[in-house]
Amino acid sequence: MDDAVQPEDLGRMKSFQKINHFPGMYSLSRKNHLAIHLARMKKAFIDEYNFFPKTWLLPAEYTDFSNDMKQNSKFYIVKPKASSQGKGIFLTNSYEYIDHNSQYVAQRYIMDPYLIDELKFDCRFYVLMTGCSPLRIFLYNEGLARFATEKFEPPNEENLNNHWMHLTNYAINRKNKKFTVFDERDDCGHKRSLSSVFEVFKISKH
């Protein structure tokens, strides 16, 4: 199935049938639900869950968000709650331009990200989840790293809308004429293997 599993679909299934989605998976895959879960975990495990920036759910937490922006004069990244492929994402340093009627997830923008070849990147880990109760997950040995196509500079008024610099989504960066993928090598270009990124981490430690 390409869509979320509905209760009526489960009710019609036979005991020997299997399906490729778990009910309620949107609770992890949608940005707003994931933000809620991370916030709850951070309250319970402060030290273990300090790996993500301060996050707000808009418009519910708009007042706290706007107050933070007034006090810190920082840049923020704002994402639609349930979109994908970089659609609707923008950077801002002014709360006045945010639609109060739209639902977003807003975060403090990381101004000094770890870079490889002066480019921002993200890492994708692939897992096979075979059950929820008990929880059973297999982590694949290999993964994917997606790179931006413009050299990173801290956000300012001139580059604020340069998504090729600030976002790593493939759907966005593949439209840049600088985008490259190497078939024979996995340690260069704008789509690389996760293991090649780990090698860079090892070298940087020394």
Image (cartoon, rainbow, N blue to C red):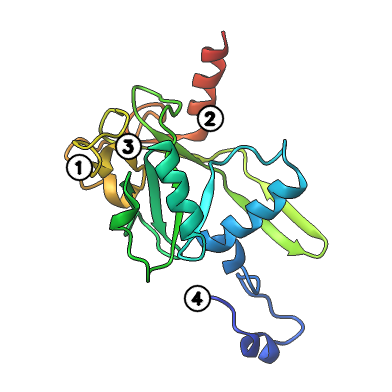
From the image, state whether disc 3 or disc 4 is nearer to you: 3
Q: Along the polypeptide, which appears first: circle 1 or circle 4?
A: 4
Residue on which the image places disc 3: 148
Residue on which the image places disc 2: 195
Q: Which amino acid does label 4 sit on?
A: Asp
Q: Distance between the residues labelled 3 and 4?
A: 29 Å
Q: How far apart are marks 1 and 2 (CA)?
A: 25 Å
Report which quarter residue 9 is drawn in.
Answer: bottom right
Residue on which the image places disc 4: 3
Is 176 left or right of 69, judged from the image as shown?
Answer: left
Q: How far apart are marks 2 and 3 (CA)?
A: 18 Å
From the image, state whether disc 2 or disc 3 is nearer to you: 3
How many numbered discs, if any? 4
Q: Where is residue 4 in the image (x, y as percent from the top left)?
A: 54, 76
Helix or strand or loop: what does disc 4 sit on?
loop
Helix or strand or loop: what does disc 1 sit on?
loop
Quadrant (top left, top right, bottom left, bottom right) of the C terminus:
top right
Q: How crowded is mark 3: few (under 14 residues within 10 Å), some or many (20 or more)?
A: many
Q: Along the polypeptide, which appears first: circle 2 or circle 4?
A: 4
From the image, state whether disc 2 or disc 4 is nearer to you: 4
Question: 18 or 10, which is in the foreground?
Answer: 10
Report which quarter residue 86 is drawn in.
Answer: bottom left
Badge 3 vs badge 4, beta-carbon distance below 8 Å: no
